[in-house]
Image (cartoon, coloured by chain):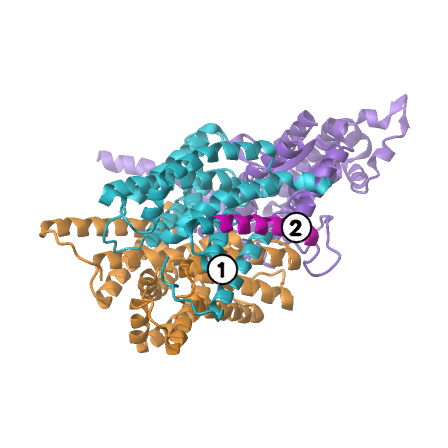
Chain colours: A purple, B orange, C cyan
């Protein structure tokens, strides 16, 4: 008798749980950054998972069985949409889920509409990166988050049109938060996030802000990350690999050269000498290194040239306490400021 | 039952690889050219890279399934050249072990691939894929190709097994080489190369290497004739594959390390059992087979 | 002139390593355990990963100690596995160790940030970044290694050629152990600096070339050194002038040279009666 009552109680308790679970949308992302943004938009209406976690090399994903199963049950698959996640093609094939294949309703390519940097001139690969379509590390710029959010919202609405308003509201809310985090409240209130973003993208923001307003310059009203980053705006640095293009574009860092522009190919003697001289001549103090790289080579470079290697996680990573994209950029800016 | 169905195709793939690799493994251990499959895989990759760069069939859409036509042709070509070199350089004039020649080929192939990809393409993104492989995602198409190659090479070796076995048994004798033998040496390396290309594409270098060496090592330790050796190896390989795939699902880890660990455990257990059962008999100073 | 100064530390590093690796390479060739250095490198990397998992920071002294300790333990097991009538060749045993170590490393790679960098194929290094300080540390570690091998050199040489030390298997194993430990130390120290393939090639390549043409043991070591040093220098020069990745340039150069040497020897007309003497 007791057992039956307990059984009944358990059933009653779990039923609401099951009911809620059934109506939740399952979102799977390639990277934790996209997952973070997706959570902001879908909030409680979806479960969001990501395949590549924090400190992992975005090019290498160990083939765990759970990935295929995750994808098999997913309603939405969020990926960059350029050729960064080359490991995903086999995974998607094997997941046998027609909802999330390229072109289907549940496939979201977040790079749609992003202004791509480093597009190669020639169609073949001889010049640059493995990445034919340009630099795919779009998550490093807050401006791109807004476009990512828009793309994710479109996907969500396709899959769940009933709650369109809810998603749009969250999206606008998120976009507003990004604007304010980037420019500070005052300027956003005066000119609106969109105008400011357009100016920033066209590299005309600071000319614009040089204007007089009342008895100061507009630039004095600047807040947020751009203000935090002012001290190092215009500084020259080196990067280990081309991860930071979008970040440096917005925050005014001049990345003079790369140690390993082509992944997996160690530099030649000529390039090494060139870099060593460059660092000395231009007195470059900082080298940005994504934290998924091994530390031995950057350390050797530090020893050889006196430069300081600043290790930054490329993505949101709960394990080290970076819960979302905002905290990620906070961390990046504070680390760079400390070392420049 | 999602689990069993999920590992069905991968298991078939493992089965095929175990089938052919245990056989080759016994040969390889006797000839003491342990790392030949890793070398052949690198050489094939080099051929692929050259083919890709020369015919610029590098598309943005990487299908892990097929080989492009020219890259495949080139990888076979390079394997032939390597097989030829290995055959010629097993000669009494050359006072270094063949394994050293093979090792050097491995290093050169890998580094030349890096240089070619550097100059011709953009970088080396697929290194990890080749190491771990994606056997859990094996497709019907890949399985069919594998089955085809294993069957062709397998049947060939069944027909001419005496030739190959006698070659291997006498591998370390420095008698005068009759020219006829050279042909069979070449065919040995080349046919193995064909298998390696398919198997590595699916299961990755590590798993293929493990299937080559670990079960065959157990067979060699337990002695016995060829048939016994083959059966021991097959049983070990099949068991480890099945259990390995299951555990990989349960623990949610890549399959390669699990299968290898199991193969290692089977090897160790087999060795210990053998030692214990031997200690029960009067101790004989036996010479090896 | 500036270039030469800039390239000086790497050149010196290569020359030192060419020498010490030529010595070990000749032993390795005699023992027929070619892939031992790749196995040792992977085992050491696994050891470092274990150290990191135990809580030590990535490049801390503690992690390094764990790595060395782990490597020495495994090498100890390996040397004590040698028996009189060996059914399974030592190279196969090395293959087994390598395989399992790589498998374990793959499993652990996920749990460590940057874990994929401890897996053999990706152990790149670039000798071009080496500093004088680094070179000095290498020398400091190599000196005891050299001394030990000078003192025990003759016996180790005998063992490498298949004989027993003092007619006892257990004594032989001890000498084996000493050899492997000193060897292991050299590998573990040099791989992070130069990358796995450069170390491998400097170990096997020059020794092979000299072995093909030179008969005396000491001669082989010396010629191996010369060839290794010359190959490194030429490789660096090519890397510089043709703007090719440095390590791969040296490795390919020496490797191709070895093949040329082998084929040359094959087709040399000179009838040599004593070809079968040393191996």
Q: Which residues are magenta?
A: C222-246
By secondary structure, the bulk of the magenta-drawn segment is best described as helix
Q: Nearer the viewer, mark 1 or mark 2?
A: 2
SS at badge 1? helix
Q: Position of residue A40 (x, y in %)?
A: 60, 38
Whole-percent x, y for residue C145 in the image: 43, 36
Which corner quadrant holds the C terminus of chain C? bottom left
Q: Is residue C230 magenta?
A: yes
The tag on residue C237 is: 2
Task: Give the residue displayed 28% in from the left and 42% down from the top.
Answer: C173
The N terminus of chain C appears in which quarter of the rendering? top right
Tell me which chain the residue with mark 2 is part of: C
Quarter-of-image position of residue A166: top right
Figure quadrant of residue C80: top left
Badge 2 density bin: few <14, some 14–19, many ≥20, Cα 10 Å: some
Q: Chain of mark 1?
A: B
Q: Rate crowding at label 1 as few (under 14), some (14 to 19) or many (20 or more) other CA atoms within 10 Å.
A: many
Q: Which mark is residue B105?
A: 1
Q: Which mark is residue B150?
A: none
What is the CA distance from the residue labelled 1 to the residue labelled 2? 23 Å
**Depth check: A339 or A168 in front?**
A339
Asked if residue B279 is positioned above or below residue B27 in the image, the reply reads above
Specify whether residue A50 is in view: no
Q: Dot 2: what SS? A: helix
Residue A208 makes an appearance in the image: yes
Q: Position of residue A158 (x, y in %)?
A: 61, 52
Q: Please tell me whether residue B224 is drawn above or below residue B281 in the rendered image.
A: below
Percent x, y of residue B203: 43, 58
The magenta stretch spans residue A273: no
Q: Is residue A104 left or right of residue C220?
A: right
Most foreground residue, A126 or C267: C267
């Amino acid at each position: 008798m007791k057992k039956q009552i307990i059984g009944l109680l358990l059933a009653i308790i779990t039923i609401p749980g099951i009911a809620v679970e059934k109506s939740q949308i399952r979102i799977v992302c390639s990277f934790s950054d996209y997952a973070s943004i997706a959570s902001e938009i879908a909030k409680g209406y979806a479960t969001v998972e990501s395949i590549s976690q924090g400190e992992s090399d975005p090019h290498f994903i160990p083939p765990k069985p759970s990935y295929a199963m995750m994808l098999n049950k997913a309603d939405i698959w969020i990926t960059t949409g350029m050729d960064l996640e080359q490991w995903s093609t086999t995974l998607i094939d094997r997941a046998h889920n027609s909802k999330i294949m390229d072109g289907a309703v549940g496939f979201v390519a977040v790079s749609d509409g992003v202004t791509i940097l480093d597009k190669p001139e020639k169609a073949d690969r001889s010049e640059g990166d493995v990445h034919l379509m340009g630099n795919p590390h779009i998550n490093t710029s807050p401006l791109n988050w807004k476009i990512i959010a828009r793309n994710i919202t479109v996907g969500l609405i396709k899959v769940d049109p009933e709650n369109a308003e809810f998603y749009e509201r969250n999206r606008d809310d998120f976009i507003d938060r990004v604007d304010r985090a980037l420019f500070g409240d005052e300027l956003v209130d005066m000119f609106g996030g969109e105008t400011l973003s357009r100016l920033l993208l066209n590299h005309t923001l600071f000319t614009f802000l040089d204007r007089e307003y009342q008895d100061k310059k507009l630039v004095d009203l600047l807040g947020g990350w751009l203000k935090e980053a002012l001290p190092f705006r215009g500084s020259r640095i080196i990067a280990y690999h081309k991860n930071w293009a979008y970040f440096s574009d917005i925050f005014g860092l001049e990345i003079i050269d790369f140690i390993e522009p082509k992944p997996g190919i160690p530099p030649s003697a000529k390039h090494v000498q060139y870099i060593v001289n460059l660092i000395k001549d231009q007195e470059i103090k900082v080298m940005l290194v994504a934290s998924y790289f091994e530390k031995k080579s950057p350390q050797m470079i530090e020893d050889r040239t006196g430069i300081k290697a600043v290790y930054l996680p490329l993505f949101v990573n709960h394990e080290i306490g970076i819960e979302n994209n905002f905290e990620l950029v906070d961390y990046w800016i504070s680390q760079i400021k400390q070392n420049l | 039952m999602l689990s069993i169905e999920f590992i069905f195709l991968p298991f078939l793939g493992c089965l095929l690889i175990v089938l052919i690799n245990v056989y080759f493994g016994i040969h390889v251990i006797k000839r003491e050219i342990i790392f030949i499959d890793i070398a052949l895989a690198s050489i094939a990759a080099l051929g692929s890279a050259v083919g890709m760069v020369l015919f610029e069939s590098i598309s943005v859409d990487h299908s892990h399934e097929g080989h492009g036509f020219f890259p495949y042709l080139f990888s076979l070509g390079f394997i032939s050249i390597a097989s030829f070199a290995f055959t010629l350089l097993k000669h009494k004039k050359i006072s270094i072990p063949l394994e050293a020649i093979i090792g050097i080929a491995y290093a050169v192939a890998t580094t030349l691939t890096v240089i070619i990809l550097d100059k011709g393409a953009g970088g080396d993104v697929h290194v990890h894929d080749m190491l771990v492989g994606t056997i859990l995602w094996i497709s019907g198409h890949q399985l069919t190709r594998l089955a085809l190659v294993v069957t062709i090479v397998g049947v060939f070796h069944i027909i001419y097994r005496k030739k190959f076995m006698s070659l291997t048994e006498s591998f370390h004798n420095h008698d005068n080489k009759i020219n006829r033998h050279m042909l069979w040496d070449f065919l040995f390396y080349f046919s193995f190369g064909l298998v390696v290309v398919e198997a590595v594409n699916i299961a990755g270098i590590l798993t293929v290497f493990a299937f080559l060496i670990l079960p065959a090592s157990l067979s060699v330790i337990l002695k016995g004739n060829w048939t016994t050796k083959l059966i021991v190896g097959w049983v070990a390989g099949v068991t480890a594959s099945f259990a390995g795939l299951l555990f990989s699902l349960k623990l949610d880890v890549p399959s390669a390390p699990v299968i290898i660990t199991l193969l290692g455990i089977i090897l160790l257990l087999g060795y210990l059992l053998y030692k214990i059962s031997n200690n029960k008999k009067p101790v004989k100073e036996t010479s090896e087979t | 002139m500036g270039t030469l100064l800039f390239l000086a530390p790497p050149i010196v590093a290569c020359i030192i390593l060419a020498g010490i690796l030529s010595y070990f390479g000749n032993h390795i060739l005699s023992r027929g355990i070619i892939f031992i250095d790749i196995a040792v490198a992977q085992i050491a990397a696994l050891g470092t990963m274990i150290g990191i998992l135990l809580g030590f920071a990535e490049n801390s002294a503690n992690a390094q100690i764990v790595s060395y300790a782990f490597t020495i333990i495994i090498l100890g097991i390996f040397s004590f596995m040698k028996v009189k009538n060996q059914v399974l060749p030592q190279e196969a045993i090395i293959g087994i160790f390598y395989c399992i170590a790589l498998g374990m490393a793959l499993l652990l790679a996920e749990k460590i940030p940057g874990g994929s960098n401890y897996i053999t194929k990706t152990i790149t290094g670039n000798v071009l970044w080496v500093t004088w300080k680094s070179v000095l540390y290498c020398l400091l570690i190599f000196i005891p290694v050299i001394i030990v091998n000078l003192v025990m050199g003759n016996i180790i040489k005998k063992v490498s050629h298949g004989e027993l030390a003092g007619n006892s298997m257990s004594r032989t194993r001890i000498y084996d152990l000493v050899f492997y430990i000193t060897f292991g130390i050299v590998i573990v120290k040099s791989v992070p600096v130069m990358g796995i393939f450069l170390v491998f090639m400097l170990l096997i390549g020059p020794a092979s070339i000299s072995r093909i043409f030179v008969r005396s043991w000491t001669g082989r070591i010396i010629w191996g050194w010369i060839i290794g040093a010359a190959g490194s220098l030429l490789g660096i020069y090519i890397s510089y002038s043709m703007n090719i990745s440095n390590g791969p340039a040296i490795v390919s150069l020496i490797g191709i040279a070895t093949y040329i040497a082998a084929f040359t020897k094959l087709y040399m007309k000179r009838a040599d009666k004593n070809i079968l003497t040393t191996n």
